[in-house]
Amino acid sequence: MTSDQNTPASATGAGRAGRGLSRRHLLFGGAAAGLGAAAAAGAGVGILTVQQSTAAVTPPVEVVPNGAETVPFYGAHQAGIAVIPQSHATHIAVDLAAGTDRASLVRMMQILTDDAARLSQGQHALADSEPELATVPARLTVTFGFGHEFVTRAAGVVPSWLRPLPAFGVDRLEDAWTGGDFLMIVAADDPLTVAHATRMLLKDTRSFGTVRWTQAGFRRAPGSEKPGTTMRNLFGQVDGTVNPHTQDTDFDQLVWSQGDPAWMAGGTSFVLRRIHMNLDKWDLLDRSGREQSVGRDLANGAPLTGINETDEPDFTAVTPIGFPVIPEFSHIRRARSDNPAERIHRRGYNYDDTPNPGSVSNSGLLFGSYQADVDKQFVPIQKRLDDLDLLNEWITPIGSAVFAIPPGCAETGFIGESLLA
Amino acid sequence: MKFRTATTITALAAAAMLTLAGCAGTTTAAETSTAAPEADSLTIQDAWVKAADSGMSAAFGTLENASDTDLVVTGVESAASTTMQLHETVENESGAMVMREKDGGFTIPAGGSFELAPGGNHLMLMDLTAPITAGTDVDFTLTLEDGSTYEFTAPAKDYTGANENYEGGDMDMDMGTGTPTDSMDMGN
């Protein structure tokens, strides 16, 4: 999905050093050489450790910045859903102004599509006051979503699931993080890129509505880990092991709408739940208790019945005294459905905001998930977790919003045209 | 969607000459249209116009000349404004940057480009006929020295810059006290 940064200069470097190593490894080696002793700090990255010996004799290789990497904007589906998650994402909900009618929505989506198309390819937007900030796309994607009110004003058929989620017992929802008529998710591997794109998009939104909330989240920085490594949340848990992968045979069916209603064909739905994580209370729990609450090993995310992260959990395994190894109340047991269609494509981000007075942390997870049908896929899972999930002792949903994500568009079109054109 | 600048070229000059020639009865259409209209060589990239409720506004973009001779844009028209002018922004005798009509039009060098940007040269809409709302497409027609014309469409964008003072003959209106949210409204 991302462009390969093969430049003549670096290709020459790779050829010179040769020895059957990939160019990417050599780039890491070059970085290690350049950093000298500081390379030891990268001990967690196996490549760096291995490369230190060769780095000493290899001339420094120019490091190719990853800021030039781009994700295609145009296509059958919107960008930013199936691509390997970027390091930073800002979710923005907009309330439409009273006078924003269907014709206004057409104008707004044409402008915003043009902005997103240009910025994602490292080109400044039209009327961009800081065009120099647009030159580092860093895999920037902008994903647009429509709330119930948006579709209503567009006089479109509202998907049956496009409404607030059912009230769950664990919810303590705050207005500040809930609802919204229009969604933009701005994601990139560079937070300055995200900030500039967000600024540009919001400048072009102000004639049509007002910001209801923004929620910014992060993962590991690019290069910190192998791309595609399952993220960890701020409880230290490996979070998202069973997420459907784009290469899975049922990914398309799980994520993309087949056209109910017709304008949604190739689109999907997005649920954003702001999950407050009580780190202070979590501190009271010992390591074994933490692993029991989830059902996974903290060190590598393996199920308590397995060795490796991706091992299938064995929910029938019992301890010598007859208790399930993976407790009935554990998160992975409760989240798992016997129905393979009841799965979702998660794209979560950590948040770590300013602590409230008298507290030292205000942290949690922006639990974002894509699924073809909210009611058939997301709601059954959340109902089971609402009924019983030991993790509920430490987590509290404080925000909730549901959006229809329209399909992508061709270069001649705009996002939302199947609803608005 | 990425806005593409839609263009139409018309050879008004050739048509006018044809009419005159027809009266004289001495030349034919084929003879009058041997030279390609200048507008054939002109394009504009990344065109946009500043959204505004009333009064003045301006359009921007990059004019490009694909020919091997200089092109001169001598005029601009749009249904969006009763009057339009080709403007430059210059420093006046008191050191302030002011915009004024560009004598002799915009010259786009052979094989080169000519930037129309806030704070610089621009296409000035002197008096809007209706509000230009964000996202609206506005049509413009540029006229070149040979009378040929080049049409393009520019989307309107919310933009709070481009607040230069106007040094406009007897209009003498100062925008210096305008607030950042004002469009190019000379009334302030």
Image (cartoon, rainbow, N blue to C red):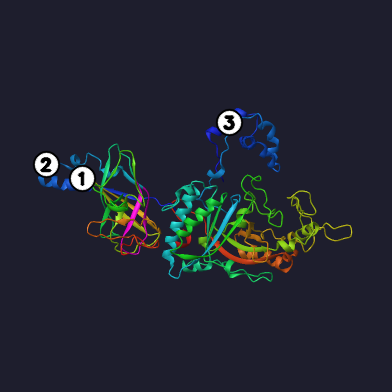
Crowding around mark 3 (Cα neighbors within 10 Å: few <14, some 14 to 19, many 20+) is: some
Same chain for mark 3 and mark 2? The answer is no
Q: Amino acid at mark 1?
A: Ala
Q: Position of residue A388 (x, y in %)?
A: 74, 67
Report the disc number at residue B170.
none
Helix, strand or loop status at disc 3: helix
Instruction: Label 2, secondary structure: give it.
Output: loop
Task: Kindly indicate whether the residues beneath marks 1 and 3 are on one polypeptide chain.
Answer: no
In which image quadrant can residue B181 be found? bottom left
Location of residue B40 (image quadrant): top left
Give A336 or A149, whichever is nearer the viewer: A149
The label nearer to you, 1 versus 3, is 3
Residue at which label 2 appears: B26
Disc marking residue A13: 3
- Range of residues picked out in magenta: B45-62
**Given this view, does label 1 or label 2 mark the residue nearer the observer?**
1
Callout 1: helix, strand or loop?
helix
Foreground pick, B82 / A71 = B82
Q: CA distance from mark 3 to mark 2?
A: 71 Å
Q: Is residue A290 above or below residue B66?
A: below
Q: Are marks 1 and 2 on the same chain?
A: yes
Q: Amino acid at mark 2?
A: Thr
Position of residue A123 relative to residue A108, above or below, is: above
Chain letter for the residue marked with disc 1 in the picture = B
On whether residue B57 falls in the magenta region, the answer is yes
The mark that comes first in sequence, 1 or 2, is: 1
Q: Do the numbered discs 1 and 3 sit on residues whose CB atoms are within 8 Å?
A: no
Q: Which residue is mark 1?
A: B14
A367 to the left or right of A209:
right
Q: Is residue B67 visible?
A: yes
